[in-house]
Image (cartoon, rainbow, N blue to C red):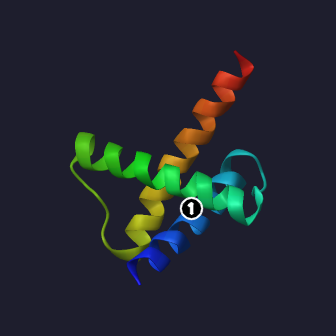
Amino acid sequence: MNVLWFLLVGVIAGWLAGVLVKGGGFGLIGDLVVGIIGALIGGLFFSGLVGFAGGGLLGSILIATLGAVLLLVVLRVLKRA
């Protein structure tokens, strides 16, 4: 059941990041990939630097979304360079 929640958080976070950064999502698979990588980035960033790793489902979605937004911004900067 934990894997299902992780995938759900990944899809939601990827979709939110796509809406915030680009104005639209990347489809189910793209949102899932961006969300999962964003969850890893957000989890590492917030637990390592800030000392906070989320609280519950909403906290996990927030952290994963912030990580996914950071990922998308970095990818855009690298794509332009």
For label 1, the crowd category at 10 Å Cα-Cα, with few meaning under 14, some 14 to 19 and many 20 or more, is many
**Residue pictured at 75% horizontal, 58% vertical:** 25
* Residue 44 place in picture, x, y as percent: 33, 46
**Residue pictured at 64% horizontal, 23% vertical:** 78
Residue at mark 1: 13
- Relative to 7, residue 68 above or below: above
> Along the horizontal axis of the image, is 60 left or right of 75?
left
Quadrant of the drawing holding the N terminus: bottom left
* Residue 22 place in picture, x, y as percent: 75, 46
* Residue 12: quadrant of the picture: bottom right
* Residue 53 place in picture, x, y as percent: 28, 58
**Residue pictured at 71% horizontal, 56% vertical:** 19
The amino acid type, in three-letter code, at marker 1 is Ala
**Residue pictured at 63% horizontal, 32% vertical:** 75
SS at mark 1 in the image: helix
- Relative to 18, residue 72 above or below: above
In the image shown, does 62 or 43 lie closer to the viewer?
43
